[in-house]
Amino acid sequence: MAATVPVRHYLQFADFDAKDYAYLLERSALLKAKFKRYETWHPLHDRTLAMIFEKNSTRTRLSFEAGIHQLGGHAVFLNTKDTQLGRGEPVEDAAQVISRMTDIIMIRTFGQDIIERFAANSRVPVINGLTNEYHPCQVLADIFTYVEHRQSIAGKTVAWVGDANNMAYTWIQAAEILGFQVHFSAPLGYQLRAEMLSPNAKQYLKVFDDPKAACEGADLVTTDVWTSMGYEAENQARLAAFKAWMVNQDLMAVAKPDALFMHCLPAHRGEEVSAEVIDGPQSVVWDEAENRLHVQKALMEYLLCGKL
Ligand code: CP
Ligand code: NVA
């Protein structure tokens, strides 16, 4: 079935502008309220979502699968191991075929180039469910969570303590679009790559050597695993290099007194975050995880039906 609106993909946070996000945040709140009331809402009746996973997942799979079901549609799970993708079928060919049989596609893969090639050959919207470079659905959920707890994120300061990974680059893109600051701190050798930053980066990104200095006055402190999927061979070196970059009570103490703590999960207590912080009163990690469901429902509805 063809989409009722022109095909748009969501491959990185920068694919949408501030107006799109204003709508999506409002719509996510409305869909969340409907869900909490057990109200049936089936705008995607009979639509099929293909979910392609080349890396592991708990939250992304569950939230997309439950989400399309709650909107009246159906999900098909595909992974590299069981499909011809794992036997070398070109991404372009897979995109042609999968997009002729389904209405919307979510992909979790390695390089951003893979999802871009896929999208270029897809007749239906493609959503990034995590690549090495970006994780836009997670940051959308995080910003929705921030707004739920503290209202607008515009003008606020987000401290990123840890690896220059897909989450960090997505937060940095979001800062430019939504008008907030990112304070970034990572050890030497694990810094941001200049070619991944926009020419305006200086306006909303500040890099700190000292993780504590990055957290000073922050409204939100966030981190992620030191070793992302696909980088497992570097794990030992990373454990040593990132030792002083654990978000603990010392770091939270210099942030604003009402600062929130976020982590996209899965987390490693005692590595990138201490148990007292992730399990403490400033942490909103369970809301963040739940909100994947609500924002992705809004996203799928928006990509297939436009504004309702
Ligand atoms: N945060 C996140 O994307 O979790 P999963 O890897 O479990 O999908
Ligand atoms: N940066 C992590 C996020 C996991 C949800 C990874 O890519 O493995």
Image (cartoon, rainbow, N blue to C red):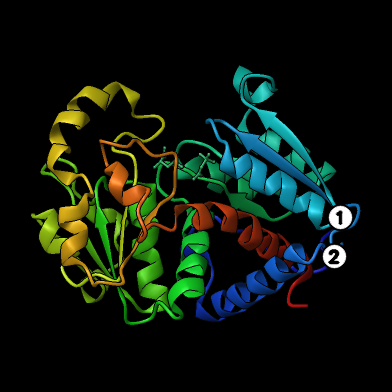
| Earlier-in-chain disc, 1 versus 2 | 2
Taking the image in four quarters, ligand 2 sits in the one at top left
Q: Which residue is mark 2?
A: 41
Q: Amino acid at mark 2?
A: Trp
Mark drawn on residue 223: none
Please, what secondary structure does the residue beneath circle 1 have?
Answer: loop
Residue closer to the observer: 263 or 196 = 263
Q: Amino acid at mark 1?
A: Gly
- Decide: marks 1, 2 in contact (CB < 8 A)? yes
- Give the x, y percent position of residue 290: 58, 54
Residue closer to the observer: 48 or 246 = 246
Q: Which residue is mark 1?
A: 72
Relative to 239, 110 lies left or right = right
- Give the x, y percent position of residue 154: 38, 81
Give residue 3's quadrant in the image.
Answer: bottom right
Please, what secondary structure does the residue beneath circle 2 have?
Answer: loop
- Give the x, y percent position of residue 102: 81, 45
Q: Is residue 108 visible in the rendered structure shown here?
A: yes
For residue 76, above or below residue 2: above
